[in-house]
């Protein structure tokens, strides 16, 4: 981040400091008319991503029933949830590079095929081991599918349309977790917990059949795969996510938590040393140091941390203090999901006009205001009066943040790097979510699983202060100006 303009100094057009941005006065290449199939492609890509995000939370509601049917203890249930998150988040960087190496469409279709097959295994699981194995395979498929899908969107849309497309993508990522709680409750109480996984099969097969008709193949980028770097990156991300999940369940001072986090730090050092010397690195270190990538991931980490923490705390509050069922809790989250979608839509329009710096700062200012209201929740509060106003203000602000994070991180990225950059920003989403829940659990303390309000109030207050700090950092660090329109839609090639 050397020689970067300060927040108060004049700045070049957004994206000017990136290696792949266009020169300020260079003429852009002639382009053919955009292919009308791109919006149908967006719908299919977002539907696939929605399945992945929903599967992070949809299973949590079904855990008691799964435990009874498959005779699983607490440790086994933890792995039903953690196996998916670990493989999804841990393999995203490798999945992003494979999307560039194999070709985006091919990587997406392979990942989706793996995810569908794994969902079928989960739905037909006869033992706890079979279910956990299926969740591992789901995570592997998701790690290949998700960055490929985002890179297709990034290279398919251009100019203001890219902002709108990324707004839809961000709304899916922000609201999917909330919808997952409701869907999980409805399916578990209806057809049974198996349907939580089996519902992915017909949806996935439909996407698998339709996507090749609207997304043309693109040539793969032939380069050797940095296997040692891939192993180091995967181990680092997996250890970090596992340590954060473990901290949420057992506390920060628990031995396994400490060992996992130390291992993640050591893995990061090994990864950095490997990437400095590799002839064809998995992730060039210069790319991680690029201003757009670094600040975009800071915003994504922060947005995901605050949102997942808020969902976790609100769910605990509703079910433990107000005695809400899982289904009623999911219904409460529906207007919150709509607020995220509204924020993402507004952000997709505003970012193209005023740039992501002001929008990101405003988003976190809204989030801080909503969290201040939530910090005043009474023990016997009314959902409509006491919970939803603050939560919806928070959700609106974080909807703004998700689009700013993705737009900033992918600004000026060339087609040959789109998969890897998408993997980086998606990794920030997964790690941020795990960190937010772990931190919320540690701060709320005895209120989690108990019947006291003080811990919830303290946790919401701490996250309010953090959101206010991020709002200031956004003004200082996020590049000014409007996003670069990129190097053209893939359909024009």
Image: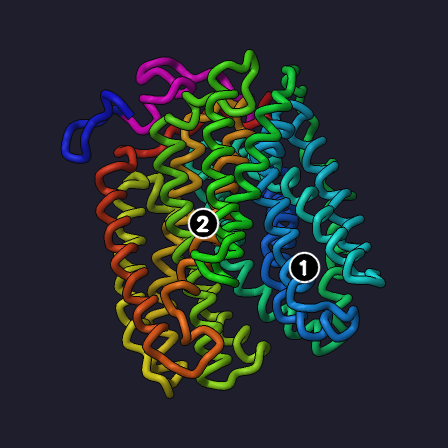
Residue sitting at x 47%, y 64% = 338
Nearest the eye: 80 or 252: 252
Residues at discs 2 and 1 in contact (Cβ within 8 Å): no
Task: Report whether residue 153 is seen.
Answer: no
Element under disc 2: helix
Q: Which residue is mark 2?
A: 432
Where is residue 127 shown, x and y percent of the image?
82, 62
| Residue on which the image places disc 1 | 80
Q: Position of residue 48 (x, y in %)?
A: 65, 48
- Main secondary structure found in the magenta portion: loop
Which of the image's four quarters has the N terminus?
top left
- Mark 2 vs mark 1: in front: 1
Please name the residue shown 42% across and 26% down the image.
Answer: 412
Residue found at the very far bottom of the displayed protein: 380
In-image side of 126 versus 46 (left or right): right
Judging depth in this view, the residue of 281 and 199 nearest the camera is: 281
Helix or strand or loop: what does disc 1 sit on?
A: helix
Residue 13 can be seen in this image: yes
Between the C-alphas of marks 2 and 1, the distance is 20 Å
Q: Is residue 471 above or below residue 58?
A: above
Residue 328 rendering spot, x and y as whole percentages: 55, 80
Q: Report the side of 492 relative to 431 (left or right).
A: right
Q: Is residue 52 magenta?
A: no
Residue appearing at x 76%, y 52% in the figure? 134
**Which stretch is magenta?**
13-33
**Position of 44 compared to 33: left or right?**
right
Q: Earlier in the sequence, mark 2 or mark 1?
A: 1
């Amino acid at each position: 981040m050397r020689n970067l303009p300060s927040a108060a100094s004049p700045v070049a057009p957004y994206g000017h400091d990136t290696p792949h941005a266009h020169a300020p006065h260079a003429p852009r290449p002639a382009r053919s008319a955009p292919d009308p199939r791109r919006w149908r492609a967006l719908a299919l890509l977002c539907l696939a991503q929605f399945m992945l995000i929903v599967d992070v939370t949809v299973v949590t509601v079904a855990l008691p029933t799964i435990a009874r049917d498959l005779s699983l203890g607490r440790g086994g249930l933890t792995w039903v949830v953690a196996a998916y998150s670990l493989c999804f988040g841990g393999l995203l960087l490798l999945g992003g590079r494979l999307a560039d190496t194999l070709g985006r469409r091919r990587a997406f279709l392979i990942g989706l095929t793996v995810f569908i097959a794994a969902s079928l295994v989960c739905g037909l699981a006869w033992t706890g081991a079979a279910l956990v194995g299926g969740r591992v395979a789901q995570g592997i498929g998701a790690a290949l599918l998700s960055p490929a899908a985002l890179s297709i969107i990034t290279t398919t849309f251009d100019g203001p349309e890219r902002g709108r497309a990324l707004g839809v993508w961000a709304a899916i990522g922000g609201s999917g977790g909330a919808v997952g709680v409701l869907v999980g409750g409805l399916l578990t109480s209806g057809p049974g917990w198996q349907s939580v996984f089996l519902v992915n099969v017909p949806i996935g097969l439909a996407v698998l059949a339709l996507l090749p008709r609207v997304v043309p193949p693109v040539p793969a980028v032939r380069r050797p795969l940095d296997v040692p770097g891939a192993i180091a990156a995967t181990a680092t991300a997996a250890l970090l996510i596992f340590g954060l999940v473990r901290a949420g369940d057992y506390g920060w001072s628990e031995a396994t938590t400490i060992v996992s986090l130390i291992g993640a730090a050591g893995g990061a050092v090994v990864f950095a040393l490997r990437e400095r010397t590799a002839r064809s690195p998995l992730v060039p270190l210069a790319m991680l140091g690029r201003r757009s990538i670094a600040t975009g991931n800071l915003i994504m980490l922060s947005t995901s941390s605050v949102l997942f923490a808020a969902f976790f705390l609100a769910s605990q509050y509703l079910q433990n203090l107000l005695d809400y069922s899982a289904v009623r809790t999911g219904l409460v989250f529906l207007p919150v999901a709509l607020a995220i979608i509204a924020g993402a839509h507004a952000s997709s329009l505003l970012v193209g006009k005023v740039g992501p710096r002001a929008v990101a700062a405003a988003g976190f200012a809204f989030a801080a205001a909503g969290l201040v209201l939530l910090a005043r929740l009474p023990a016997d509060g009314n959902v409509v009066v006491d919970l939803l106003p603050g939560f919806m203000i928070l959700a609106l602000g974080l909807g703004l943040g998700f689009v700013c994070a993705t737009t900033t991180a992918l600004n000026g990225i060339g087609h040959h790097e789109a998969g890897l950059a998408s993997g980086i920003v998606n990794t920030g989403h997964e790690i941020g979510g795990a960190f937010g829940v772990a931190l919320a659990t540690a701060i709320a303390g005895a209120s989690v699983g108990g019947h006291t309000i003080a811990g919830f109030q303290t946790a919401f207050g701490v996250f309010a202060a953090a959101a206010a700090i991020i709002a200031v950092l956004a003004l200082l660090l996020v590049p000014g100006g409007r996003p670069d329109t990129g190097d053209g839609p893939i359909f024009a090639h």
